[in-house]
Image: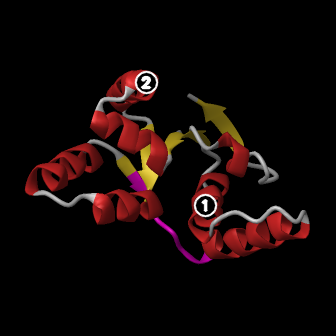
């Protein structure tokens, strides 16, 4: 499964370039999703009724992967791994990476700089 991160979904919602085109194609495959962390982040950023409706429509069209005990264990390992390299990433990024790893999914992101630090995470960029 391909999992979209927050930046990519925001690009889609704003109709920005290649990200928007790629996400539109991926949504049609139905083997496309996001994480509960990303769902939280884009819902928290929606301010107007129109934005909230667009976010709800988008998320309703996607699989949303949960964050549970196994993902928490992996996220802690990810956090320790990137911190040991002296290049920490945000906690939300650790959690998103963990969900992808636990589900053997590929993360589609514009934030390769942060996510490429995570050992075992499969990535594709836009």
Decide: is 40 above or below 1.
Answer: below
| Quadrant position of residue 102 | bottom right
Observer-nearest residue: 51 or 62?
A: 51
Left or right, residue 24 beside residue 37: left
| Image mark count | 2
Mark sitting on residue 20? none
Please check the rendered image and state whether residue 67 is part of the magenta-colored stretch, yes or no: yes
Q: Is residue 99 above or below residue 80?
A: above
Residue 76 vs residue 110: left or right?
A: right
Q: For numbered disc 2, what is the local secondary structure?
A: helix
Position of the C terminus, as image quadrant, is top right
**From this viewpoint, which residue is outermost toward the right?**
85
Q: Which residue is mark 1?
A: 93
**Residue 17: x, y in percent?**
40, 23
Q: Residues within 10 Å of mark 1 (few under 14, many from 20)?
A: many
Q: Nearer the viewer, residue 85 or 35?
A: 85
Give the CA distance from mark 2 to mark 1.
21 Å
Could you say which is closer to the camera, residue 86 or residue 97? 86
Question: Horizontal and vertical percent for residue 52?
Answer: 17, 55
Q: Is residue 123 left or right of residue 5?
A: right
- The residue positioned 61% from the left and 31% from the top of the image is 125
Q: Which residues are magenta?
A: 64-69
Residue at position x 45%, y 40% in the image: 8
Q: Position of residue 110 (x, y in %)?
A: 57, 38
- Farthest left residue? 49
Q: Looking at the image, which residue is at 71% across and 68% down?
A: 74
Please tell me which of labels 2 and 1 falls first in the chain. Answer: 2
- Disc 2: which residue: 22
Q: Secondary structure at mark 1?
A: helix
**Quick check: is 57 in the magenta stretch?**
no
């Amino acid at each position: 499964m391909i999992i979209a991160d927050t930046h990519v979904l925001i690009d889609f919602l704003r109709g920005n370039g290649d990200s928007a085109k790629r996400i539109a194609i991926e949504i049609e495959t139905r083997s496309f999703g996001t994480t509960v962390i990303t769902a939280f982040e884009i819902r928290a950023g929606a301010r107007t009724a129109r934005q909230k409706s667009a976010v709800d429509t988008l998320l309703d069209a996607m699989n949303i992967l949960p964050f549970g005990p196994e993902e928490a264990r992996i996220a802690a390992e990810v956090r320790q791994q990137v911190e040991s390299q002296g290049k920490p990433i945000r906690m939300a990024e650790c959690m998103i990476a963990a969900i992808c790893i636990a589900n053997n999914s590929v993360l589609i992101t514009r934030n390769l700089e942060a996510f490429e630090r995570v050992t075992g995470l499969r990535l594709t960029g836009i």
